[in-house]
Amino acid sequence: METSALFSTSFHPPSLHLRSRFLSKPSPILRSPPPPSAAVPRRLFLTTTTTIKPSFLTSLPKPIKPISASSSPSASISAQPNKPQQIQGAKILPLILSVSIGLLVRFAIPKPIEVTPQAWQLLSIFVSTIAGLVLSPLPVGAWALLGLTTTIVTKTLSFTTAFSAFTNEVIWLIVISFFFARGFVKTGLGDRIATYFVKWLGKSTLGLSYGLTLSEALIAPAMPSTTARAGGVFLPIIKSLSLSAGSKPNDPSSKKLGSYLIQSQFQCAGNSSALFLTAAAQNLLCLKLAEELGLVIASPWVSWFKAASLPAFVSLLLTPYILYKIYPPETKDTPDAPAQATKRLEAMGPVTKNEWVMIGTMLLAVSLWVLGDSIGIPSVVTAMLGLSVLLLLGVLEWDDCLSEKSAWDTLAWFAVLVGMAGQLTNLGIVTWMSNCVAKFLQSFSLSWPAAFGVLQGSYFLIHYMFASQTGHVGALYSAFLAMHLAAGVPGVLAALALAYNTNLFGAQTHYSSGQAAVYFGAGYVELPDVFRIGFIMACINAVIWTFVGGAWWKFLGLY
């Protein structure tokens, strides 16, 4: 199992930045730094309990002698090969397209009579911002800042209004969830839980898949980041098991075991995230946006779990088996996996103090999230209390929080999107759009169940244009929820169904979510298979959630 201790990939997942220190002291070979031209390529390392000396340290070039005073610097410089200059700043074509789309909305499309000039101008800026999130002329945070600046410079919004979403409780709850996820990875608790399931259920490939699936469902409510679970816990375990079975990435042998385990875990992750309110950042945002439209769900954690439980459990039970039939692994039995898991657990040693603290903190947090409404403790306060405990007891250091760049980046661009979406609602744009769509649907004499199906399907398929689940929510959730309400769909049913859908479309493509980037970057699944399996499982999930979920929601009285 030494291979489980270290893995690297050239793909850096957008929602997770992990670092590990794998040397306790500097190696003697590093006393003289290598020349810049021989710099080691940047890689991503995940820490586990087994330590391997990085092989590249033994092959570093010997330090070169410094240039003497008599040497000609110009000769040294001229001897270096000419490197192509990288384009700095925004990408020109995506920039032009993103800005042009906003300008077309502002000046080329006639403003409806019902809409104020301020609202129409904000809509054009919002559309341009969303186009930039899709086309990526700049990093997401930078482009969102440009959009925010434009709203202030054009006097569309005041400074205070533009920045109002930066105090949004849900956004800070999402930020803190990144820190919780880092605690799971840093302590190794998530790795330990998953390894126990491999030990108990890993005698066959199918059992191994169910063990990994159930372990993710177990830790999901206390580890509110699907990307962190993928990159910090499950991918290292899957790679280790696959390599030990002779299944290598970017190789025909990947079909032996690795490709199936990756696809199974990837497709099940959406259902694990849909099962619990606190299992994914976008879930919390969905309910916050629903509140802004007047839909307040009582006891949100319990209500969410109750409505999601039956369809999510059915999907979690069927998905590994269905993939076992339509995307079968060459290796059917894994008799050595439980023994390997046992050795891995022995190498981990007994549960550490930090792991116990992490367990206690997460139990406290989940309990308060469940009971928070009845005792008057908001979800964000619960998260702050949990983070405070982790900091006070040394499980996390403040440097850990500062280095979690994804959290701070999310704070920046997410607050911009949520703020713009909220102002579009306040200025009447969302109401106007929903009424237009409702009239269009009524022209076909559609009943509310038919309109519900059309809108849910459209919301799902549009995600092929997005590379972020949270970005999709910030851009379209409010508008689609308003369309549901205008079409006569029961409010709570519409809000929850859209939110569940947001998790399910995270496995459509290799770019549809943070975990998609993590799993595809491992090199075990070919791109055509990602799209093919993603579409097939999307149809299967649609059937399960429509019929099983529909009957269950009828029983619960949601419609």
Image (cartoon, rainbow, N blue to C red):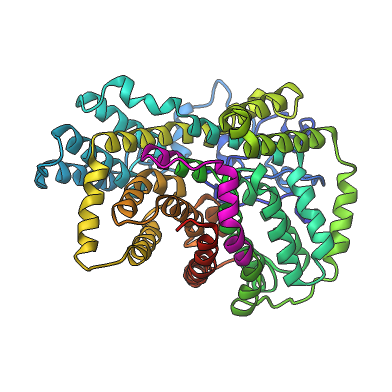
* Left or right: where 316 falls relative to 123: right
Q: Position of residue 490 (x, y in %)?
A: 39, 54
Where 465 falls versus 40 (above or below)? Answer: below
Q: Residue at x 30, y 41 (%)?
A: 129
* Left or right: where 96 falls relative to 244: left
* Residue 343 drawn in magenta: no
Count of numbered circles on the image = 0
**Residue 105 visible in the snapshot:** yes
Query: In which image quadrant can residue 208 be found?
Result: bottom right
In this rendered view, identify the residue nearer to me: 423 or 490.
490
Query: In which image quadrant can residue 205 be found?
Result: bottom right
In this rendered view, identify the residue nearer to me: 498 or 68.
498
* Left or right: where 506 falls relative to 421: right
Q: Position of residue 242 (x, y in %)?
A: 72, 64
Of the 4 image quadrants, the one containing the C terminus is: bottom left
Magenta: main secondary structure equals: helix
Residue stretch rendered in magenta on the structure: 288-315
Where 530 falls versus 351 (above or below)? Answer: below
